Image (tube, helix red, strand yellow):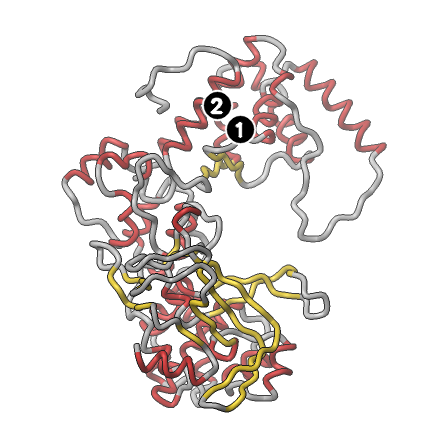
Amino acid sequence: MSGFASWLGGQGGYLNPKLKAFTEVDDNGDRGIVAEEDIEEGQQLMLIPLSCCLHMPTQQEQAASQGQHTAALQYLSTEQTRLSPFLSTVLLLLYEVGQGTASRFHAYLQTLPQEHDCVLCWSKGQLSELEGTAIEIAGDSTRTVFGREVLPIMQQQQQLWPPDVQTYEAFELYAGLVQSRAFHMLSENWLTGLAQEGVELYMLPAIDMINHATEPGKRNTLLRKSSAEMTVKVDGAPLTLHGFFTMKAERDISKGEQLLHTYGDLSDAQLLQTYGFVEAFQPGYENPHNFVPVPVHLVLQSCSESGDETALACFESKKRLLEQAKLLRNAFVVTAQDPLPDDLVTAVQVMHMEPHEFSELEKVEATDDMGEASTSQPASAEPQPAFLLGTGFMNDTSDAQAVCTTLLRLVDKLLRRYPTTLKDDAAALHRDRPMPHRHSVKGAQGCDSLQQTRCWSTSPRVHGSFASQIWHAISIPHPQAGGRWQ
C-alpha cells in the first residue's frame, strides 16, 4: 500500500494516514477501508486528481491535458468513437495492463483484485439461479462481444494491445472489474456546468476500495467531483490539478469503523447485477429500492384467464387502446414502499370493463385525441399515459373483486416464475449448500432472511406487499399472517 500512496501523492493526490486499506471487514473475507484512529467530521479522507483516474476524457479535458494522453486513448477517441464507454474503458485498462511496470497506473493496477463476482461473467448454470428475479440477462454473451467488438480492435493495433492481453480470460477479468468497480457519473455541460444526459465511467483509485451501504445511517462519507483547478505542492513544487474527486468525513468516524458510502439508490437486483453482491440481511430493515418488474404479457394473460366474459369482450380492442395510450410498456414496476402503480391498475380495470363502458371510454379518448394540442417533448422523455383511472372508478364490489382477483392471479404467476419455492430455499440455506458466488449470497444467510432469499435479487416481501395492497384496496378481509400471499 505504501507504493500506491507514494504514487498517489506524487500525482498531487491525498490519502488520509489514519486510514488502512485492504482490511477484512467481515467473516466472508471481504475487504474495505477502515479508520485506524478517530476522524473528526469534515476531515479530508481522500483527494484523487482526475489525472489518476482511468476514463475516456471529454473534449474539454483532452484540451486541458495538452496532449498528455496515451496512444491507446488517442486511438479510441478518434478511431473508435462508436464504441461504448464501457468497452472503451475496458480497452484502456487492458492497454495499461499490457504496459506492465511502464504504465503510469502500475501502482493502481497492483491494487486491483484478480477475481470478481460480477454477473457479467457467470456461467449459464449460475445465471439459471436468477430465473424469475428482477435481473434480466439479455443480449449477447461476454464471449460474443469479445470476439465481435474487442478482439478485432486489439489484433489490428498490436502495438497498443500485445498478445498477452488479447485473450478472452484477460477481457473477462478486466471487463468484470470495470463493471463492478467503475463509477458512473453524469457527464457535465462544460459551458453551463450542469449535469446533462450521458454517462462517463471512471476507475477511481482508492475510492473504489470503499464499500457500499444502502442504509443512510451507516454511511460516513460521500463522493464529490470538482472540475475546478487547484494548485497543490508535490515535493515542494507547485502542481496544478485540472479537476479531482474528493471525499470527506460526513460525520465523526470512530477508530475501527469502516468507510462506507453509496453506489446509488439501487435495488438488491441492481447491486447484484452491477457489482456482484447483495448486503447482509438486517432484521427490521429492507432495501427500500427493491422492486418487482411485472411483464405486460403476464398482466394480459391474467386478465384473459379470469373466466369473466366481460374481461374477454373486446379483448384485442382494449389492448390496442391501452397500447395507444402508452399504458402497456415492457413491464410495470411494483415496490414495497409505494401504492400499486396507477398504470397497472388502470390496465386491469380497462380489460375488465363492460362493453358499453369500454365503448364510452373509446369515445372520450377519441375526442381528447382530436382536441389535443401537439406538445414537444425531449426525445429521451418517458412517454406519459394518455389517461389513468383511479380506484374510485370501480363503482361496485363486484368490479373491485374482479380486478383484484386478477391482480392476485398475477402475483401467483410472478411467484411461479421462480424455479424453486421458499421452502426449497429455506432447506438449501439450512444445509448451507454451496451456491455460486459467495459475495452474492451473503444477503441470504439464515432461515430468518427468507424474505430476501429469492436468488438474492428480488424480495418476496415486495410480492407480499403487492398482494396486501390489492386486498386493502377493496376493503375486504386480508388473509391471516403467514398465509399464501405473505
Pick the front one: 250 or 278:
250
Q: Amino acid at mark 2?
A: Gln
Label number found at residue 469? 2
Q: Left or right: where does residue 401 sit relative to residue 422?
A: right
Q: Horizontal placement of 415 versus 442: left or right?
A: right
Q: Who's the residue at 66% across and 15% down the image?
A: 355
Residue beneath label 1, please? 339
> Which tag, 1 or 2, sits closer to the chain's start?
1
Quadrant containing the C terminus is top left
Mark 1: which amino acid?
Answer: Pro
Q: Quadrant of the N terminus?
A: bottom left
Q: Position of residue 233 (x, y in %)?
A: 50, 85
The residue lying at 31 percent from left, 80 percent from top is 2
The residue furthest left is: 431
Whole-number angstrom distance, CA of label 1 to CA of label 2: 7 Å
Q: For this rendering, which residue is in front, 349 or 235?
A: 235
Residue 170 visible in the shown view: yes
Residue 148 seen: no
Examine the image and state in which quarter residue 204 appears.
bottom left
Residue 352 is drawn in which quadrant? top right
Whether residues under marks 1 and 2 lie with C-beta atoms below 8 angstroms apart, the answer is yes
- Check the image and report above or below for 228 versus 100: above
- Relative to the observer, which residue lies in front, 43 or 111? 43
Residue 74 at x, y = what percent?
56, 84
Residue located 82% across and 42% down the image = 374
Query: Element at badge 1?
Result: loop
Q: Is residue 67 above or below residue 174?
A: below
Q: Residues within 10 Å of mark 2 (few under 14, many from 20)?
A: some
- In this rendering, the answer to whether 102 lies above or below 134 is below
Which residue corresponds to the image point at 40% horizontal and 78% vertical from the top-left?
A: 94
Residue 42: % across, % down: 47, 62
Q: Residues within 10 Å of mark 1 (few under 14, many from 20)?
A: few
